[in-house]
Amino acid sequence: MADSELRHARAGLTQVIEPADNLGTHAAQAWGPIRLLEIIQGSIPSQQDWIALAALDPGDGQYTKMLRHKLGEAIDRWRRRGKYLQPETALHYITKLGGKFLVPEDPHWPPALADLEGSAPLGLWTLGEAPIPQVEASLAIVGSRESTSYGDRATTNLVAHARGMGLTVVSGGAYGIDATAHRAALERSGQGTPTVAVLAGGLDRLYPAGNTQLLQQIAKRGLLITEMPPGMRPNRYRFLNRNRLIAALSAATIVVEARYRSGALSTANHAHDLDRTVGAVPGPINVPTSAGCHRLIKESPTQLVDDATDLDAFYGSTTEAPPASTAAANQRNYDILDLEEMLVFDALPVSTTTNISHLTGLTGLPVPQITGILTRLERYGLAAQTTSGWKKRRDTLS
Amino acid sequence: MADSELRHARAGLTQVIEPADNLGTHAAQAWGPIRLLEIIQGSIPSQQDWIALAALDPGDGQYTKMLRHKLGEAIDRWRRRGKYLQPETALHYITKLGGKFLVPEDPHWPPALADLEGSAPLGLWTLGEAPIPQVEASLAIVGSRESTSYGDRATTNLVAHARGMGLTVVSGGAYGIDATAHRAALERSGQGTPTVAVLAGGLDRLYPAGNTQLLQQIAKRGLLITEMPPGMRPNRYRFLNRNRLIAALSAATIVVEARYRSGALSTANHAHDLDRTVGAVPGPINVPTSAGCHRLIKESPTQLVDDATDLDAFYGSTTEAPPASTAAANQRNYDILDLEEMLVFDALPVSTTTNISHLTGLTGLPVPQITGILTRLERYGLAAQTTSGWKKRRDTLS
């Protein structure tokens, strides 16, 4: 457990440093959160501070020089936001809400966030008893805020299968696919935490208001997470950067329904950057509702997902995946036939019967070979022997 | 122009040797079509014939030994089909129909068929005045025989764009997507041959009967092609192998609508084997009608096609492809904003206005930087300056 001074410092940093501000993450790493906060509060960086910064430099000092310059500007920027710096109030508030402020020094800090490197969050404000699930057991499902019944149904099917695999759903808090994914996870029993919502604003005011009840349910049975302290409202910048947390916390991200420029694509792109598995559900091409999913599949290494069992491959399930459709499994696979078998199969009549001597004339194959082939075709269920001769079991041309 | 003895021999070979029978193609190559036909008609292969066969062997003679054994069996097989050997009748018939029998020795033989190597056809029976189009100007469009209106519309859109590019459509002669592709090509003007149908049976009886009128139209304004001589009926084996010709004659093959085990997938697989471009149109996942298209995209290097302009990339069109949707193009691209620009954009109000000093407090950025950013945001059409101050031009969160 991190000590309270450290937690206090990091809480303050989340109040003045915006998400994914690499300079903030670098400075916290070089100086420690406590010293960084002191500097933001007015302390002048010492010679020793600048030396500590140089330790981050992998090269010839050029990077340190650039970093020092940029960091000087950033410190000014953070200082000008000083009026927001009220870590005690925020920590008090989150406790009152029944939540926590988790820092990287805590044992339960998710190690997967380290993959974000310079844009790793400075701390996470959470609401809910459930621990943050392991990345290997988390599946991000994201998509359009204006989902259609088609997208909602695909989401529900995916979530049902995912929960059956013991996976935790991770998504945002928006209307549409996000909300459908959470609802489906809450409605379905299964091992572990059902669902986690990663929000772009503080936990004091759940956004959007229309999802308040759903988000409260998630806080009760799952977990709400945000890097924004209480009091901070979501905005476009925070939404887009929130998406990197959804991607980082999940082994795979699936975009269910998204238009050509949907925000959900940014989550997929973050997941690509993090070398996570990305999937997208296709849809009809004559409406724009799945154009973003198609775009991902066309332009990036995104897996097409058209069946919930596709998840098995994503999570390296060792159980044999059932075929995509039962109809397909029941249909005989003619591909296994070689040239000679195919010739005999094609020569067999459907409504009448024929004999081996007639088949010889039709196919050009010798009698012993035809006899062997007919036996195999019978075994495959493709030919049948009646009292009057041989016939085809089925007649389909494709 | 090949001489008549050669044409006569190859016509006969197509009557006894089934499509894609590699032994037939090898033997015709080693011995020439005329000598091969003599042997099938009863002449015993001489020592010199076997030496000519060995010339095909790239290695240590093992292949020749195997080939000699297999070829012996094949010759027996072809001989037993001797009753079909009536090249004069077939050549007379195709002339009477107004068609031709094209052989590899003819100047207009499509060079692309050489890519089929051992399974290249022994000859092609054709009906129609149009020449076989260049592979670079041909697009195969195939799919389900039981197409839906969704698949038919996608086909029509693709064909309209393809004809606008001067491409010739290549397909089978089946109901569903094949027929829709041909109809769309015939209905639309454009450069060159509109459409080519590659059939699995002889041209004396067009199959399926319900498409007779359409196929006659294609013979009039495009071309019918088959490797089966008049009198030979299509069967499963011939349908599946016919598909290799569709794939070989076209630079790209697009599967529009196909179930999980559709015959259209075999055309796509042939195209993959030939290193041709393969595309598939996605569709809804809650019905089985596009499951085969999804399977191709999942399991093979198949391009997702959700817009007719995707063809431009397939055929290396140098014209700039328009964006996938006009709505998408009109939407502003917020991705171009950097962190500081995003902070300022997010801090701008929509219904009221604000001033630069207030923006400094909200964003932590110095006044000169904010001034510069506001100017850029105005240029991007994202911010507006009024007499009372600055405001956002639009408010959208994704």
Image (cartoon, coloured by chain):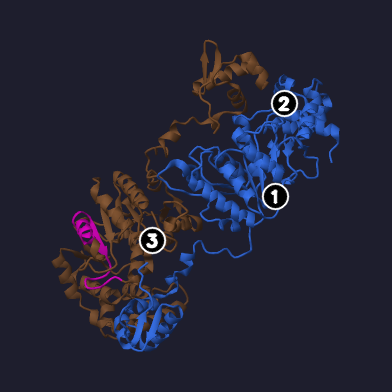
Chain colours: A brown, B blue
Residue shown at 68% from the left, 28% from the top: B232
Q: Residues within 10 Å of mark 2 (few under 14, many from 20)?
A: many
Name the residue nearer the viewer: B38 or A154.
Answer: A154
Mark 1 or 3, closer to the camera: 1
Question: Which quadrant would the C terminus of chain B be assigned to in this image?
Answer: bottom left
Residue shown at 65% from the left, 41% from the top: B197
Question: Mark 2 falls on what kind of element?
Answer: helix
Q: Which residues are magenta?
A: A211-234
The chain holding disc 2 is: B
Amino acid beneath label 1: Thr
> In which quadrant of the rendered view does residue B308 lie?
bottom right
Residue shown at 33% from the left, 56% from the top: A177
Q: Position of residue B169 (x, y in %)?
A: 64, 48
A216 falls in the magenta region: yes
Q: Along the horizontal axis of the image, is A17 left or right of A339?
A: left
> In which quadrant of the rendered view does residue B170 lie?
top right
Mark 1 or 2, closer to the camera: 1
The residue sitting at the left extreme is A96
Q: Which residue is mark 3?
A: A264
Q: Which residue is mark 1?
A: B193
The residue sitting at the top extreme is A387
Name the residue nearer the viewer: B48 or A368.
Answer: A368
> In which quadrant of the rendered view does residue A344 lie?
top right
A226 falls in the magenta region: yes
Q: Which residue is mark 2?
A: B16
